[in-house]
Image (spheres, rainbow, N blue to C red):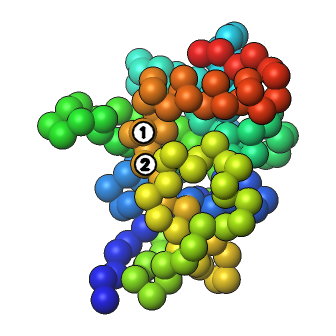
Amino acid sequence: MSIAQAWLLECGESLAIAVGDHEMVELLQAQQCHHVPGAPYYCSQVLLRDEEIIPVMDVDALHRGAAPLPFDSYLCLLQYQDAPHAALKQLAVRIRRAPDRIQVDDAQMCEFPADFDSSLLKPLALSCFTHHAKPVLVIDIAELCSAGFRDLACKLHQSDSGLLASG
């Protein structure tokens, strides 16, 4: 049995994701974000921090394939690499409450939720496990931030809803 440490991020009312210890950087509260005209609906804001522009992602909006729901949120600052030995990049993810540090083992693995087949997160899914009887997705953060995924998400969103979500 393999045990790993992870951070549990509640991105929406019915969506939780887990990220590894090495991906979590910081929890941010009451940060001023700036709207980016023409950006995809799920990533239409940026955070200016330490002279860097950091995209702010609403993973719940991406999962639902619809505009973000208004709620008071935290920002979870994550880091990732898009290639081995590449420089670290950062991403801020909207979450509903402060993250929990959890342990995950192989016995918690489960099938993806029934509504997952229609989710725009499906191409990013690495695995799924249960935590307190709720499914938790493990997604590829680097792929979430890739231009290829952005193009796919915009295409799928346009065909599903007829809305223009360009980026």
Q: Residue at x 54, y 23 (%)?
A: 151
User: Looking at the rendering, in which quadrant would you find the N terminus?
Assistant: bottom left
Tag 2's secondary structure? loop
Residue annotated with mark 1? 143
Q: Is residue 56 above or below residue 124?
A: above
Q: Residue at x 63, y 61 (%)?
A: 16
Image position, residue 114 (x, y; %): 71, 66
Q: Residue at x 48, y 71 (%)?
A: 101
Residue 77 or residue 167, whichever sits in front: 167
Residue annotated with mark 2? 140
Give the left or right position of residue 138, taking residue 122 as reference.
Answer: left
**Can you see residue 17?**
yes
Asked if the residue at tag 1 contacts the one at tag 2, i.e. Cβ–Cβ closer than 8 Å, the answer is: yes
Image position, residue 56 (x, y; %): 58, 32
Q: Is residue 39 above or below residue 127?
A: above
Residue 111 or residue 17, whichever sits in front: 111
Mark 1 closeness class: few <14, some 14–19, many ≥20 residues within 10 Å: some
Image position, residue 47 (x, y; %): 56, 26
Residue 18 has which mark?
none
Quadrant of residue 87 in the image?
top left
